[in-house]
Amino acid sequence: MTLIGDHSIITDLKPCFHCGENCQGQVHYYQEHPFCCQGCKTVYQILEGSSLNDYYSLEENPGLKPIAVIGEYEFLDLPEVKEQIIQFEDDNIYRIKLNIPQIHCSSCIYLLEQLHQIDDNIQSSRVNFQSREIVLTLKKSDNILRSVFQLLNQLGYTPQIPEANQPKSHRQSRSLLIKIGVAGFCFGNIMLLSFPEYISGHTEVDNTFKGIFKYLIVLLILPVLFYAASDYYKAAYTNLKHKYLSVDVPIVLGITALTIRSIYEMFYLAHPGYFDSLAGFIFFLLIGKWFQSRTYENLSFDKKYSSFFPLAVLKKEGSEFHITSIKELVKGDIIKLRNGEILPVNAQLLEDQASFDYSFVTGESKTVVKNQKDNLFAGGKLMSAVAMLLVSNEAKPNYLHELWNNNDSEYAKGRTTAIIDIISQKFTIAIVLLAVVGFLFWYFNSGFSKALEVFTAILIVACPCALALAAPFTYGNASRLLGKVDIYLKDASIVEQFSQIKNIIFDKTGTLTKRDATEVIYQGETLNTATQQDIKAITSCSLHPLSKFLANHINVSVRDAAIEHYEEITGKGISAAIGKNSYCIGSRQWLEENGIWVTDTIDNGRSSVYVGSNGRYMGCFEFSNIYREHILDDLKLLSKSHNVSIVSGDGNYEERFLKQSLVDNISMEFNQSPADKFKFVRTMRKNQGGKVMMFGDGINDAIALKESDIGVAVTEDTGSFTPNSDIIMHAKSLKKLTNILTYGKDCNRVLYGCLVASIIYNLVGLGFAFTGLLSPFVAAVLMPLSSVSVVVIAVGLTNYFAHKRNIVQ
């Protein structure tokens, strides 16, 4: 061998240490490792310099060969390109989303989610394996987009810009339909041309035509093999290349075996062969694939959009504001946000100034002050008083839903789903081994022809994909049905967790009680009209139930006056100023913390809001609570099977009433701050055993909802979007809670039933195939039917139980 430079030699073929491809000619060495090109060596050096060599321990040769890219990504400077890439932008960061089609394994995910160790300008990266997308948070600078594109290209993951409106799935569906059409046309004609082989009494003329038909059949099978079935070859090759045995591998083996056998019998034994069975197999396989993809697309569409649409916003119509779903917003609409609400669209600020918290997007809790005519990105939470905004783009609900799903979700993959994936992989290996054993057994007992028939039938009839389809279709359809009754799940696999819930915690105000009061009593000095207008204006900025009670109760019009120095402390109250008057509205403790001494002693069993102005106590508004219809009966029913607790920030003035209305085994805690609720949930998770489900209004209970295993934000105002929750439930659906939890158990039973049915099908089919009683053609029909049957069972039974449990009508 001859040395060339410091690190290269001319040698025989060697596998590249990074990408695994054979080194052609010149080999580039670094630390005694061979690399096929300078690009692969550079990637290794980048990873080594960033202490990411563990990347190579995840699997052998996990890397991708870098692709040479012409130009320096000048197109990234174009405004229309930036608009497609940048999801969020402020003075410090960009948040961008890119398509990375080269993502193929766990090592890819590991590397791409460690990019912040390679480049300090990358703050975080998050990979969506299913959609082959990466979301990056970048430190803002002039050339950061170019440098990130160049880095990804160096690593072998050449990025692509997401297409507007994402029509990819429609193109894939159209391509699949064309392949089905080609396979169906060829299958029908091959059957027609093969018909003479199935009848007896041929003449010499018949034999002449049979010879012609034979060649026509071969011509017709070519587009089926090389076009209609091409996706299976590609998938099998990719999976084998990365040492993963997927369901596509036995399918391709079956196609290959049936093709070889048919050619052998047709040209050497003068038999008709099995090209009709082969074309039929691929035709029915593609139909099953199309059915699955269409059904899953429908479920995904419903989830992507429906699961986000509790969200609405106040839209200006004439001189008034009305709640409007964000999907109905268009450019030029004027919307109003209240303190704590999420901005659902890109918009322009109409106020002189407003503060927003983009921690929901960036992960950093930092208030950003925006001025009039500043452009704002969707996803920010208003941290000041009411703000008016001009919509600059139509809503992209899938973007906000994506933020919700990426917000520390623990449900990316349910426990049962993971087990099923493992079973499917092991099952595929077992099928291939069984096919080999069957081939050898029949070869030594009946000869090559029978052995090949059994080998083919085993590979074709087995269907591990039916196992893999059971969970996503069961839980996906359940999530879709729950969305129809305004129960919106962050992830479909949450349904699986319902059966594991042992402890249920309820907040009281706004959760067990309605968000309107039967009676409001004011005690204190008389409030003039101007003061009432100011109090109404300030409380209208808040989403807290008691603030809404008060704003709705004060029957005066709000005067056009700027609210300044607005501050709302969760669980305590609001401070703000209008003109020369300062106000403090909230709990007794909140007023006293602000130096206002409460002179009244009020303890009559009602929720109270105290008001102070200019450092002086003015009075107290008292509210009588209305409990939701049948909710107390529902709590008693739940307590028979779960540990039920009520944890409230109010005083214990309703404890006697609740104890008389409920049962002894329901525990109650009052005067609980948001931090106390958080500690209560954490203690219950540690000490009680079983999963904890927390129901709250999403305002005072945000940290407790996040700490629970399943946090449910109960809302009547569809503008209240709670990022920390796992479920957003309209209050009207609380009455169905017992049925919903039972429905979760039903769904688990449906899943197990699908698994049992799939296993029985495979055992019976394999039994017939192994004993030589099943022809490849019948196996070709049964294989996709098993997948279709699992989908039909999963969707049909989840629909049935949803109606039986009175969840949907």
Image (spheres, rainbow, N blue to C red):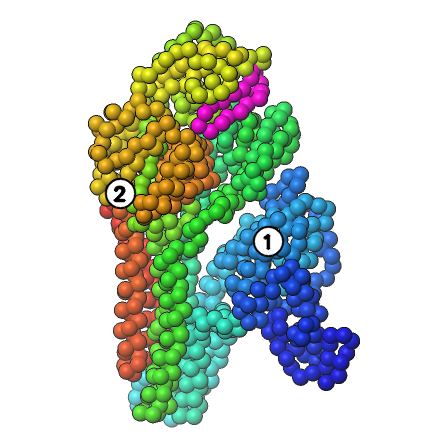
- Around disc 2, counting alpha carbons within 10 Å, would you say few (fewer than 14), some (14 to 19), or many (20 or more)? some
In the displayed structure image, the side of residue 117 where residue 664 appears, left or right: left
Q: Is residue 82 above or below residue 355?
A: below
Residue 739, quarter of the rendered image: top left
The range drawn in magenta is: 556-578
Mark 1 lies on a secondary structure that is strand
Q: CA distance from mark 2 to mark 1?
A: 45 Å
Residue lying at 35% horizontally and 65% vertically, measured from the top left: 466
The amino acid at mark 2 is His
Q: Is residue 651 above or below residue 616?
A: below
* The C terminus - image quarter: top left
Residue furthest right in the image:
5
For the image shown, how many numbered marks are present on the structure? 2
Mark 2 or 1, closer to the camera: 2
Q: Nearer the viewer, residue 180 or 344?
A: 344
In the displayed structure image, the side of residue 22 where residue 805 appears, left or right: left
Q: Is residue 629 above or below residue 235?
A: above
Q: Position of residue 445 (x, y in %)?
A: 31, 92
Q: Is residue 383 magenta?
A: no
Of the two numbered discs 2 and 1 on the same chain, state the one appearing first in sequence.
Answer: 1
The amino acid at mark 1 is Leu
Question: Which residue in the structure is indicated by mark 1?
Answer: 98
